[in-house]
């Protein structure tokens, strides 16, 4: 026969349950509000960090002579000779531009893929700021979350995808957005799209292959000599190793914190966005340091990008 619970014990349990419920109702929503407000630029005015506006990852903040906010990107010093002399420069002064908030892609874009299937939106918003007003090609888009975000700021945007099933999804998405064009073929099969910036988040060994190929396209006059490539790297594992090997060839880079509440991987972390100007790179040094990746490792279609094989 079950004995009745003593009154003091029952009272203690009721108080404990009430305390747990109060914590859930009070602390839970507060934590939820903090998380929801984490996007880098949720409002059209510059957020403040002390007395200066927060310009985003990789940028220093200052003010112009009339008090307006400026965001400054510091180039990396160039030690090796540049390949194309018409673009040779050792100028490492910061490049400053008036503050313009990036698109809030967490609100503007309905994601089809979670991170790390796609780049985090915090990173993509930074990329969108870097390519504002430019002609941009994204290489490999899957279902189009990245290009849907980046194309919010571009003059013209293309996504180049070789997988037919993803191409069909992208074409439907492009028709609805009207901001980007879908090219269903492997990069860089002709006709090559001449753009200001090429954007990609690649399997590690593909990064030097694509840089090498883009530089060859510039030498042959198929791509403008001023073109650059933005490559994204996770701050761990093989991608981190590849970034540290490629860092000496980068013009500049940004470390971008992110928060992705529906991520399949870490919800919080950092990614690196490296900016490369292939025409300014010492191509012989790149080839010597990455001969295995460039000439002997297979690309996405099972073939490497050799000297005559693109």
Image (cartoon, grey):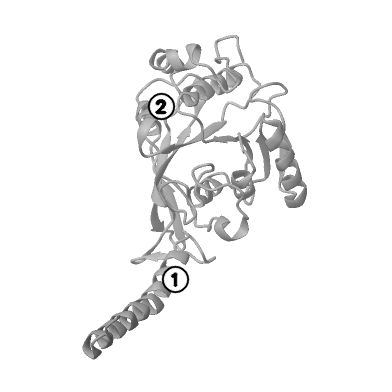
Q: Determine whether the residue tagged by mark 1 lies in a helix, strand or loop.
A: helix
**Residue 302 falls in which quadrant of the image?**
top right
Q: Indicate left or right for 115 with 269 as reference.
A: right
Above or below for 188 versus 275? above
Please state, as top left, top right, bottom left or bottom right, where the N terminus lies in the image.
Answer: bottom left
Q: Is residue 228 above or below residue 303?
A: below
Q: Which residue is mark 2?
A: 249
On residue 105, which mark appears? Answer: none
189 lies left or right of 236: right
Rendered view: 185 above or below 128: above
Pick whichever of labels 1 and 2 is earlier in the sequence: 1
- The residue shown at (37%, 21%) is 80
- Give residue 231's position: percent from left, percent from top: 49, 35
Q: Which residue is painted at 64% across and 42% down in the image?
A: 143
Question: Is residue 194 in sight in this rendering?
Answer: yes
Which disc, if any, is residue 33?
1
Relative depth, front residue between 181 and 87: 181
Q: CA distance from mark 1 to mark 2?
A: 41 Å
Indicate the quadrant containing the C terminus: top left, top right, bottom left or bottom right: top right
Q: Is residue 23 left or right of residue 228?
A: left
| Foreground residue among 1 and 275 | 1
The one nearer the camera, 292 or 58, is 292
Q: Residue furthest front?
A: 1
Quadrant for residue 188, please give it: top right
Callout 1 environment at 10 Å: few (<14), some (14 to 19), or many (20+)? few
Q: Which marked residue is nearer to the observer: mark 1 or mark 2?
A: 1
User: Residue 171, how many percent across, how many down?
Assistant: 75, 41
| Residue at image point 40% right, 66% down | 48
Dividing the picture into quarters, in which one does residue 254 lie? top left
Q: How many marks?
A: 2
């Amino acid at each position: 026969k079950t004995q009745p619970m003593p009154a003091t014990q029952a009272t203690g349990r009721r108080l404990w349950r009430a305390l747990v419920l109060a914590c859930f109702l009070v602390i839970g929503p507060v934590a939820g509000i903090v998380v929801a407000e984490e996007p880098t630029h949720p409002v059209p005015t510059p957020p403040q960090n002390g007395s200066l506006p927060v310009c985003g990852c990789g940028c220093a903040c200052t003010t112009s002579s009339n008090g307006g906010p400026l965001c400054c990107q510091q180039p990396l010093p160039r030690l090796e000779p540049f390949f194309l002399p018409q673009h040779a420069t050792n100028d490492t002064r910061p490049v400053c531009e008036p503050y313009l908030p990036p698109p809030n892609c967490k609100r503007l874009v309905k994601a089809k893929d979670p991170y790390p299937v796609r780049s985090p939106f915090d990173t993509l918003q930074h990329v969108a700021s870097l390519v504002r007003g430019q002609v941009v090609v994204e290489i490999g888009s899957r279902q189009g979350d990245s290009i849907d975000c980046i194309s919010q700021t571009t003059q013209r945007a293309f996504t180049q995808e070789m997988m037919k099933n993803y191409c069909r999804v992208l074409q439907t998405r492009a028709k609805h957005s009207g901001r980007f064009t879908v090219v269903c073929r492997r990069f860089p099969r002709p006709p090559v799209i001449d753009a200001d910036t090429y954007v990609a988040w690649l399997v590690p060994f593909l990064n030097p292959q694509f840089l090498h190929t883009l530089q060859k396209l510039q030498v042959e006059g198929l791509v403008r000599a001023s073109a650059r490539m933005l490559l994204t790297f996770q701050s761990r594992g093989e991608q981190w190793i590849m970034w540290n090997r490629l860092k000496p060839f980068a013009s500049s880079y940004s470390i971008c914190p992110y928060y992705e509440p529906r991520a399949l991987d870490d919800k919080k972390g950092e990614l690196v966005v490296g900016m490369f100007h292939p025409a300014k790179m010492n191509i012989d040094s790149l080839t010597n340091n990455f001969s295995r990746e460039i000439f002997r490792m297979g690309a996405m279609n099972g073939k490497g990008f050799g000297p005559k094989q693109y």
